[in-house]
Image (cartoon, grey):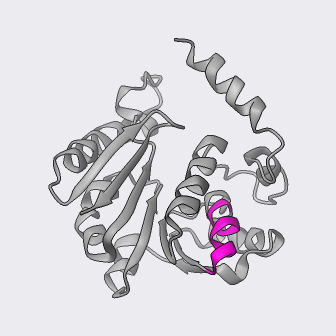
Amino acid sequence: MDFAKIGAYIERLYQKKELTQKQYTEATELKEFGAVVDDDVARMLQVLITLTRPQKILEIGTSIGFSTVSMAKVIKQHGGTIVTIEMDAKVAEQAAKNFEREGVKEQIELKIGEARAVTAEMSEEFDLIFQDVGDKKLYGEMLEDYLRLLKPGGLLVAEDTLFPVFDFDPECGYLNSMCEPLDAFNKKIADCPQFESTLLPIGDGFTVAVKK
């Protein structure tokens, strides 16, 4: 199966979508920071939100806000809101500008800080949690936090979860360092009795888990 050919075909089908990753990053001033989800991941998030109609979403890892905006454009239609956490203040500042540019700033509460510290102060429950944070060790380390913050029937969604089977350049230490903690998370979520989950070959790996 030619996955590159499949991916190119899918992207041609959806190239006229309202907002694409390319359009978003080109309109962003902070060019040196381009860590954003792929278009197929953004679309899958939008499908999940349309299907489940969450009122409150928690995002761990804002980056420059492409995934946040993609979710906000859909959740806006039924009056939902998003809390998103970004550790880098400079990146968060750019994300805030992007939210205003895209007309979704009223749907988004942007918090700056380390994810574990910020979530430790939270007591509200969420219908959907999306994690795409740079420090992949947090995926497994924060699972108990997610169980506490998710409503029964809520979704935990994680990006990059197929990294453990990717053939990264041995000299690319940063990417290779992510594989072990992501493999540990994958095993943890697959064996967790409180979640019903699966891992889909979307983007760099897209895990969806439902809290029982």
Q: Which residues are magenta?
A: 70-79
Q: Nearer the viewer, residue 109 or 7?
A: 7
Q: Nearer the viewer, residue 33 or 96?
A: 96
Q: Is residue 173 magenta?
A: no
Total labels: the figure holds 0
Residue 189, position in %: x, y?
24, 50
Residue 75 visible from this viewpoint: yes
Q: Is residue 73 magenta?
A: yes
Relative side of 42 to 165, left or right: right
Residue 208, position in %: x, y?
39, 50
Q: Nearer the viewer, residue 71 or 87?
A: 71
Relative side of 88 to 33, left or right: left
Q: Residue at x 58, y 79 (%)?
A: 81
The quarter of the displayed image where residue 90 is located: bottom right
Q: Residue at x 67, y 53 (%)?
A: 33
Q: Is residue 206 above or below residue 92?
A: above
Q: Is residue 40 above or below residue 107?
A: above
Residue 6, position in %: x, y?
62, 21
Q: Residue at x 63, y 81 (%)?
A: 79
Q: Is residue 119 above or below residue 173?
A: below
Q: Residue at x 48, y 55 (%)?
A: 132
Q: Is residue 127 above or below residue 47?
A: below
The quarter of the displayed image where residue 174 is located: top left
Residue 71, position in %: x, y?
62, 63
| Quadrant assignment for the C terminus | bottom left
Q: Nearer the viewer, residue 79 or 179?
A: 79
Residue 36 visible from this viewpoint: no
The residue furthest top is: 1
Magenta: main secondary structure equals helix
